[in-house]
Image (cartoon, coloured by chain):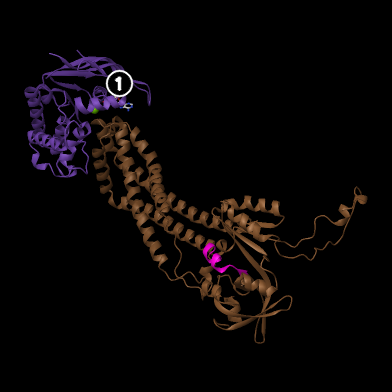
Chain colours: A brown, B purple
Amino acid sequence: MIQRSVIMSIAKTHLLSKLKQTIIAALGVTFGIGSYITLVSFMTGLNNMLDDLILNQTPHIHIYNEIQPSKQQPVDIYEALSGSLNMVRSIKPKQTQKKIHNAQPLIDLLEKDPRVRGALPQVKTQIFYIAGPIDLGGNLTGVNILQEAELSNLGDYIVEGSPQDLENTANAIILGSGVAEKMSLEIGERVQVNTVQGELFPLKVVGIYQSGISDIDNIQSYTNLKTAQKILGQPENYITDINVKLYDTDDAVGLAKKIEEQYGLRAVDVQTANAQFETGNTVRNLISYSVSVTLLLVAGFGIYNILNMLIYEKMNDIAILKATGFTGRDVQWVFMSQALIIGIIGGVTGLLVGYLLSVVISNTPFETEALPTIETYPVNFDPWFYIIGISFAIVATFLAGYLPSKRAKKIDPVRIINRL
Amino acid sequence: MENILEARNINKHFKKPVLFHVLKDISFSVKEGEFASIMGKSGCGKSTLLYVLSTMDTDYEGQLFLHGELVSGQPADKLAYIRNKHIGFVFQFHYLLAEFTVLENVMLPARKLAERSYEEIEQKAMEKLQILGIDKLALKKASQISGGEKQRVAIARALINDPVIIMGDEPTGNLDSHNSENVFNIFRELSDEQGLSLLIVTHDQDFADKTDRIIQMEDGRILA
Ligand SMILES: Nc1ncnc2c1ncn2[C@@H]1O[C@H](COP(=O)(O)OP(=O)(O)OP(=O)(O)O)[C@@H](O)[C@H]1O
Ligand SMILES: [Mg+2]
């Protein structure tokens, strides 16, 4: 049976008698937990922002028709030559259409799949932008702009104008910010696009698009699906790409594989497309966790030290307590409680410090041309970090207190009393 | 009269630094209400015997009975309980918890026993301090009172759980004759009026002469 109140009052008195060391040990924990919270909130905030920036702009599955040489050349099929070693050098792909055959039935089929949030048809083409004497190479993508705005975050990156403007205006274009700048184009002005086939087509600028990645913003523009088809002189079933959004990105690999096998199309899943990007995230997380663990380890040693010192100084108290009927376990708990008090007080102030720092960071202006949607530094206020932080503090102090308190438990009162 | 404490054929060896037979076949008993003293030359094993009798030292052969119940071989937690409830111990040096008040020091064993509420324990501790004439010191820190006062606080603490026996290892060894006499009178009263048994190690012949019985020790043996 453990009398908690008397043990706690002994622990408290011991800590108060060594107030300075207690505060220093608790500050060690505060420092460890505070920096863990700050680091991990900031790092994951950054990660999420970069996720939004790059990952969310790439579809979960991107389906297109890749131009590649036929795997089977006529000579391979010719029966008379089967069995012999046929070599064909310098194979070139056939001039095929980029068009996805039977795109609409495929989209309908995908939309019915319960894993799929939406399948977005696109027409991608290379064009030249012409305004006055300047012409610039670039990409024009025809999209169902309202559907895109709903399912992807394309809308977030339209910094001037709106998806509605594109939808409601005939022969309109949303220009990449780099393109607009280079050609000094503003909303309401006109730009001509020149297709590879040589057609010239005037479009009205209704919006500016800025992804934050200048390589994209310098070439990319968006128009309506129908407008793109019209520019290319193609019918309404002309679709070059299908972007699939899923409910769960983990389904991407399997589904992409199935599409490739069944339809003979290229289907690239998001995991494959962004493998390097994920590595970056992992490394950032690794850094924040290893820094925090190191700090906590230091804090743990601080607690270990102060307890060892306390036990050494309180040898007499331990002997008296044992002589007057306190059990070894009682004495162990006296010191464990001290470790836990330090851990909890230090941990809670650490959470507070971490939270306050996070708030300060999240209110610090962070304005950059490259990131139009971001105004302050991104911080992730996930409550899980706080739960992990306090559990971490308690576990670390528990471990740091365990060995010294075990020693206190084993102290033989007779030896201490005899020594005087 | 009933035996409160009984030792039967107790032997103890120290193995380090060399094998040393420190307690040799010790058998004796202390009766209810008896005030006994132990005398003997320095190094004859008085303190060692007292640690065995108080259940703090379990490394011995032989049997120890408290209230007719065998204590030897009981698990450590049970022994701690026996010390807590039935035995009061007063050391030669005033062993108090320095950062606690006098009152808190006296209350600690009772709070461990947890048979009474905090308020009851507090009241009882005040009564004991009153008996020993130091109730005015109750709220002082234990480190801020004199040696004689500390010794009386230690006695009050030994009394808090109404033990059946009080053991003391030279409890007056550090006190002047006045304080020493004072402590003796307190013991005498406890024995006469409350029927408490006492077993006190002392070097003070005058002190011993006034007790009911003197147990003489020599070289780890009790002389008849
Ligand atoms: N832990 C120990 N290890 C080895 N020998 C010890 C130990 N403790 C005591 N002794 C020896 O045992 C003998 C008895 O010691 P004890 O402390 O019981 O003597 P004492 O009768 O109380 O003496 P004093 O009157 O000086 O207090 C002494 O010779 C002492 O040196
Ligand atoms: Mg001695």
The residue to which callout 1 is attached is B74
Report x, y in % for residue A209.
56, 73
Mark 1 neighbour density, 10 Å: few (under 14) some (14–19) many (20 or more) = few
Quarter occupied by the C terminus of chain B: top left
- Magenta stretch, residue numbers: A142-152
Image quarter of residue A118 = bottom right
Q: Give the camera-side residue of A209 and A362.
A: A209
Query: Is the residue at mark 1 in contact range of ligand 1, meaning its CB lies under 8 Å from it?
Result: no
| Residue A243 rendering spot, x and y as whole percentages | 61, 61
User: Does A133 appear above or below B131?
Assistant: below
**Residue B162 inside the magenta-drawn segment:** no
Q: The disc labelled 1 sits on which kind of residue?
A: Gln
Q: How many marks?
A: 1
The quadrant in which residue A55 appears is bottom right
Q: Chain of mark 1?
A: B
User: Could you tell me residue A257's position as x and y percent?
Assistant: 66, 51
Residue A309 appears anywhere in the view: no
Picture residue at 70% right of the left edge, 73% below the top: A233
The quadrant of the rendered image in which ligand 2 is seen is: top left
Report the predominant secondary structure element of the magenta stretch.
Answer: helix
The outermost residue toward the bottom is: A132
The residue nearer to you, when weighing A284 against A407, is A284
Q: Is residue A41 visible?
A: yes
Q: Quadrant of residue A67?
A: bottom right
Nearer to us in this view, A372 or A163: A163
